[in-house]
Amino acid sequence: MEVQTPFSAGTVMFLVRNHVLKWKNHNRFTPNTTPWGHGRFCKRLISGKKCFSKNIKTSVACSYSTEKDDTLPSIKQLTDARVIYAVAPALGHNKESHPESSARVPAIVTALEKMELTSKFRGSDILELQNFKLASVDDIASVHEKAYVSGLEKAMDRASEQGLIVIEGSGPTYATPTTFNESLVAAGAGLALVDSVLLLELMVERQFLVGQPYCMLLNKLCSLMALGHCFTSINVAASKNQVDPPMGFALIRPPGHHAIPKGPMGFCVFGNVAVAARHAQRIHGLKRVFIIDFDVHHGNGTNDAFFDDPDIFFLSTHQDGSYPGTGKIDEIGHGAGEGTTLNLPLPGGSGDTAMRTVFDEVIVPCAQRFEPDIILVSAGYDGHVLDPLASLQFTTGTYYMLASNIKQLAKYLCGGRCVFFLEGGYNLDSLSNSVADSFRAFLGEPSLASKFDDPAILYEEPSTRVKQAMQRVKHIHSL
């Protein structure tokens, strides 16, 4: 089966322009909010550490901080970047022979180095955020119940005594003595990328302190806020004039989209993308957040967190009948949030053709109609044909297509504001190759999927069943 080339930017623009708007316009920003009025910005950031994996012979930079440091990126560095990423490998959060292992993020980092997709080889085009703060308990509690957060923190004493504990009564989610802290690091990576994408936009619009150190800029913002300045009305049109807005990618674990408000689930501890969505609203004053989840499993935690929220649209494609058994096609939201949840279970065997059609006929019209202020992506790579935990037929080329098209969609709908969050993906080769090809898509470079994908192992997709599922979801959501 031949893997097709991705949609062009012109094709995405055509799709966006030709879907009829059916919803009323909404104000883009919540009134009386003051973005950047938050401790994340008003305190000086500090330096990172080096972590080492016993399974992979490479060092991995942990992008969080414990000591004072002046080696922070300048605004010019952030402005020049086409890809901004942060690394949180959670090397202490590991269970022997568990698929969600500490080898996952180091495998990706190694692949990026090997394929020359880091700043070492690409200069200012690619920027790794080396310094950011852990998410706070308040950040996490914007999505999760405080009793769960405090309970998990206390459970670390038991984990220290036993070495490893199970924290989900009916499932496979484990914890080690470092799990609580490393989960805060993972969530913090996502918040830092959202901050950076939005901070860049504000600086380009207002032309503040270009070329000055990041910490100086943050101090300046805090000073302006103290004088009564408000930065709620970030100009989306101005950001659309950027030639190539930077894409963010949080290379993090533990993953998050299964974690429900009251507890952990399915390898997931805190809902990283959900916490970032609330952060974009609470701290930056954005109103409407569009979340795309293409993990092979339904993101039930994200689904539940925003099921009655009209300002966060959650769209999930996942394998029908897979863990955790949620995400039925008739689950569309509740109350004020009815219609802002879309679940599309795909039959086993669905692959590249199915996902291209889904993007064209479901994702684009939903995003166009919703008119988001930012797009966040739960990027699970476990739909790959080589992944051991499911039976879809996605390829490296499929993920390149998704990354390329989502980038273009964000550019045309919300000024390029977009951050990817690593979720699943348990074959280290297909995971790392697919993430690397996503980076190429972000850079606007050709895919190298043909070097990794083997068409001979693919079989005919269940096109009739895919068509039936799509017809039903399009009818339910009036697409």
Image (cartoon, helix red, strand yellow):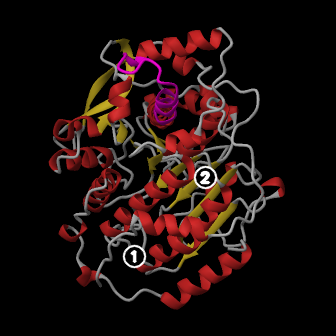
Q: Is residue 131 magenta?
A: no
In the image, residue 23 above or below residue 183: below
Which residue in the protein does label 1 denote?
Answer: 352
Mark before the other along the chain sequence, 1 or 2: 2
Q: Is residue 209 magenta?
A: yes
Q: Is residue 433 left or right of residue 369?
A: left
**Which quarter of the rendering shows the C terminus?**
bottom right
How far from the left and from the top, in percent, is residue 403?
Answer: 40, 58
Q: Is residue 386 left or right of residue 225?
A: left
Q: Is residue 278 left or right of residue 49?
A: right
| Quadrant of residue 193 within the rendered picture | top left
**Region rendered in magenta:** 196-214
Q: Amino acid at mark 1?
A: Asp
In the image, residue 36 above or below residue 128: above
Q: What mark, if any, has residue 290 been given in the picture? A: 2
3D distance between C-alphas at marks 1 and 2? 23 Å
In the image, residue 80 above or below residue 228: below
- Element class at badge 2: strand
Q: Amino acid at mark 2?
A: Phe
In the image, residue 191 above or below residue 425: above
Query: Could you say which is closer to the camera, residue 187 or residue 229?
Result: 229
How far from the left and from the top, in percent, is residue 309?
Answer: 75, 50
Query: Residue drawn 62% across and 50% down?
Result: 372
How far from the left and from the top, in percent, is residue 91?
Answer: 33, 37
Query: Could you say which is closer to the camera, residue 36 or residue 255?
Result: 36
- Element class at badge 1: helix
Q: What mark, if any, has residue 324 been given in the picture? A: none
How far from the left and from the top, in percent, is residue 344?
Answer: 60, 71
Query: Residue drawn 18% across and 44% down?
Result: 113
